[in-house]
Image: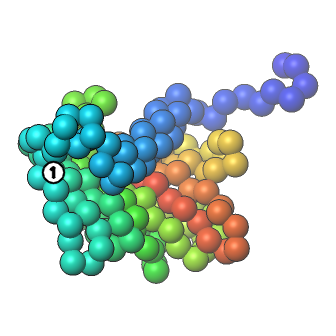
Amino acid sequence: MPDGNTPAASGSGNMRWYIIGGIALLLIGGWLLTGGAAKLTGGAQGVDVDRNADGSTTYQNDEGSVTVGTSASMPANWPSDAPANYSGAAIVYSGTSNPQTGQQGSAVSYTAEASVQSVVDFYQSQLAAGGWTVNATANVGGATVISATKDTRTFGAYVVDTGGGTVTVTAGIEL
C-alpha cells in the first residue's frame, strides 16, 4: 500500500452517505430559514410556515417537517430506543422525512459543551443499551462518525469539535 493511504473502515461507504445526508439536511434547513423556497416559488405554496414563540421556525408539508432555530426540539418521530441528545444540547435543527431516498427518517443537529470523545462514548453506550449494533466508528475529515443498525433501521451521528470546548453533532435515523 502506498505511503499515506490507510484502509477504509468497515462500513465507510454507508458513513459517507450519513455525512452527505447530514450536510444536506443542514443546507436545506438553512435554505428554508432564509426563505429560499418562498423566493423560488413566488410564495410558500404547499408549505405551512410557523414562526414559533420560542424563536424557531417550523416548515411543514405532506412530506415532512423542518424546525430551525436555537429552541428547536427533537423530531416527533424520533424512536424511543434511539439515543437522545447529549446532556445540555442546544438543538438548532430538527426534521423528519428523507426526500433524497423517499424513506421515512429523522435528523437533529445540536451543539453541546463537551469533547468529541465524551459524545462518542455517550452514543456508543446509549446505542448498546438500546439494543443497537454499532457497525463502525471512524474519523473522517476531522470528524468522528458513528454508524449503527437495529432491525431495519439505521442510525448515524457526525461529531465535530468546533473549538472552545464545544462540539456540533448531526444525528439521523432512517426508519
Is 110 displayed left or right of 162 in the figure?
A: left
At 17% from the left and 42% from the top, the residue drawn is 43
Q: Position of residue 148 (x, y in %)?
A: 43, 47
Q: Secondary structure at mark 1?
A: strand
Where is 136 relative to 103, above or below?
A: below
Residue most extreme to the top: 1
Residue 107 in view of the camera: no
- Displayed quadrant of residue 166: bottom right
Of the pair 161 and 126, the residue shown nearer to us:
161
Residue 11: give x, y in percent of width and height.
Answer: 53, 33
How is the structure coloured here? rainbow
Is 52 left or right of 8, judged from the image as shown? left
Quadrant in the picture for the N terminus: top right
**Residue at the farthest right position:** 3
- Residue 101 lies left or right of residue 132; in this view the side is left
The quarter of the rendered structure image containing the C terminus is top left
- Relative height, residue 108 to residue 142 (above, below): below
Residue at image position (16%, 56%) is 49
Q: From the top left corner, tell me how far across and down residue 38 is, in percent.
A: 23, 43
Of residues 105 and 72, the one nearer the viewer is 72
Front-lying residue, 144 or 11? 144
Q: Amino acid at mark 1?
A: Gln
| 46 lies above or below 54 | above
The residue depicted at 53 percent of the width and 73 percent of the height is: 112
Residue in the foreground of this view, choosing between 81 and 84: 84
Residue 162 seen from this side: yes
Residue, disc 1: 60
Quarter holding residue 82 = bottom left
Q: Position of residue 89 (x, y in %)?
A: 45, 74
Q: Residue at x 70, y 48 (%)?
A: 142
Label 1 CA crowd tier, 10 Å (few <14, some 14–19, many 20+): some
